[in-house]
Image: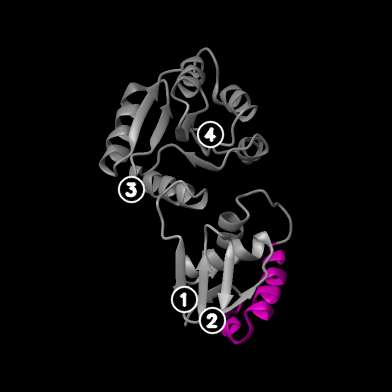
Amino acid sequence: MNSLKILVVDDESRMRKLVNDFLSKKGYEVIEAADGEEAVERFYMEKDIALIILDIMMPKMDGWQVCREIRKESRVPIVMLTAKSEEHDELLGFELGVDEYISKPFSPKILVARVDALLRRTNRLDTAEVVEAGNILIDKAAHQVKVNGENIDLSFKEFELLVYFVENKGIALSREKILNNVWNYDYFGDARTIDTHVKKLRSKLGNCGEYIKTIWGMGYKFEI
């Protein structure tokens, strides 16, 4: 993995050190900021921040303000850390463009796992560009899919859905989990939209559509 830069913003030095230690062990380069104003300054100073871990309650400028400022110029992934867990706070965060929302206290290992997953979703981690699954060949860089050697046309969401299935091969995935990972919290409607996309995806995959198994009452599993 390349040494990606992560900006950790929290007014508690002990919290910053804890997060820094765990992220550094995974090979990330961690940059710290103790308040919102410093966070914005460091973000624009460094230029190549791959992800921000951002506390809400801070002096000078809170997490909401920091998020608003950065979203004016950048779509860098943002993980919100907060002691609050009210639903309206989470919804506000997603409206402002927050990608993940983790309430304190939290497991540092879970935080690192969320960071890894978020960076994979946004293609910041080095992952295999070409993936094979049975008779399906996926070229992530070219955004192309071949089935039995023939190119097939997929919509953006169908492509993302297929990649998510293949990367989680053999794992039972609930509709909620699929929605959260493929739609990235942007969609607050009926989870049955997944069923519609799966139906179209199966049809386009031809006989390879059988790889997507239905788990009644739960969701789906990709299995060859």
Q: Earlier in the sequence, mark 2 or mark 4?
A: 4
Residue 211 image label: 2
Tags 2 and 1 touching, CB below 8 Å: yes
Point out the stretch of residues depicted in magenta.
Answer: 191-216
Q: Nearer the viewer, mark 2 or mark 1?
A: 1
Mark 4: give few (<14), some (14-19) or many (20+) Cα within 10 Å. Answer: few
Residue 133 image label: 1
Q: Percent from the top left, x then y, of residue 160?
A: 59, 61
Q: Earlier in the sequence, mark 1 or mark 3?
A: 3
Q: CA distance from mark 1 to mark 3?
A: 23 Å
**Identity of the residue drawn at 56% across and 56% down:** 181
Mark 2: give few (<14), some (14-19) or many (20+) Cα within 10 Å. Answer: many
Q: Percent from the top left, x then y, of residue 214?
A: 59, 79
Magenta stretch: includes residue 206: yes
Q: CA distance from mark 2 to mark 4?
A: 41 Å
Q: Which residue is mark 4?
A: 84
Residue 1 image label: 3
Residue type marked 1: Ala
Residue type marked 4: Lys
Q: Earlier in the sequence, mark 2 or mark 1?
A: 1
> Which residue is outermost to the top?
60
Main SS type for the magenta part? helix
Magenta stretch: includes residue 220: no
